[in-house]
Image (cartoon, grey):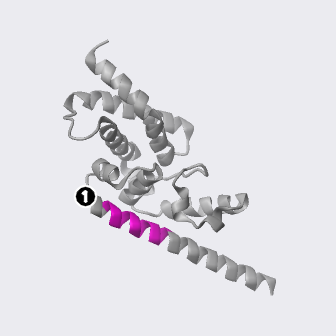
Amino acid sequence: MSDKAEQFKLLVEEQQERIRSVCRYFSKNAADQQDLFQEILINTWNGLDSFRGDSKPGTWMYRVAINTALGFAGKAKKRLQFSVSLDTPALKTFAEEEEISLEEGREKMLEELEMYINQLSVIDKILVSLMLQDLSYREIADIVGITEPNVRVKIHRIKNELKQSMKFESHEMSMFNKHQMK
């Protein structure tokens, strides 16, 4: 096996789950996820010769994955649908523990969270997807190509925006339910 093939094989083995997560975040359809995964692998293979080693290979591949996901979405970037599952490790950063303690509440919160995330700009969706992968701000900055302080600020604003939107929705629903009971 050539050096390039061996390097590619190792990189894919190490990053496969993270890349599949990117595919799940950017498509709910299993066939589209597989197509996107294959496209990421092709782009990784094609770009491997130009990898300069300025970052970790995994960070570089993640960046290829994000860029491929954006390209895969084509002209529909703004309509790119983000998908979150209940087992996402960093999901609790968007909700208080009490809000996600009951399964029914968790599912409702998850649906609301997906709805609000899908209203974000493409770059904000990417930041959320990377944050939900439990990456450090440094890793996110390397992948997205912005400074670490900028990542911190953007993620802080996104979290606040999502929390506010979800609280407003919860408040509206509770007011609606009280009104219905009268």
Q: Position of residue 110 (x, y in %)?
A: 60, 59
The magenta region covers: 151-162
**Quadrant occupied by the C terminus:** bottom right
> Would residue 153 be counted in the magenta stretch?
yes
Image side of residue 54 versus residue 17, left or right: left
| Residue tagged 1 | 147
Report the amino acid beneath label 1. Thr
Q: Main secondary structure of the magenta part?
A: helix
Image side of residue 143 versus residue 72, left or right: left
> Could you tell me which secondary element the residue under label 1 belongs to?
loop
**Quadrant occupied by the N terminus:** top left
Q: Residue at x 39, y 42 (%)?
A: 72
Q: Residue at x 32, y 43 (%)?
A: 63
User: Is 138 or 69 nearer to us in this picture?
Assistant: 138
Q: Position of residue 36 (x, y in %)?
A: 44, 37
Q: Quadrant of residue 180?
A: bottom right
Q: Quadrant of residue 112?
A: bottom right
User: Is 43 or 157 nearer to us in this picture?
Assistant: 157
Q: Is residue 21 above or below residue 48?
A: below
Q: Is residue 79 above or below residue 71?
A: below
Q: Position of residue 83 (x, y in %)?
A: 53, 51
Q: Position of residue 122 (x, y in %)?
A: 38, 57
Instruction: Report the label total.
Output: 1
User: Is 92 or 1 nearer to us in this picture?
Assistant: 92
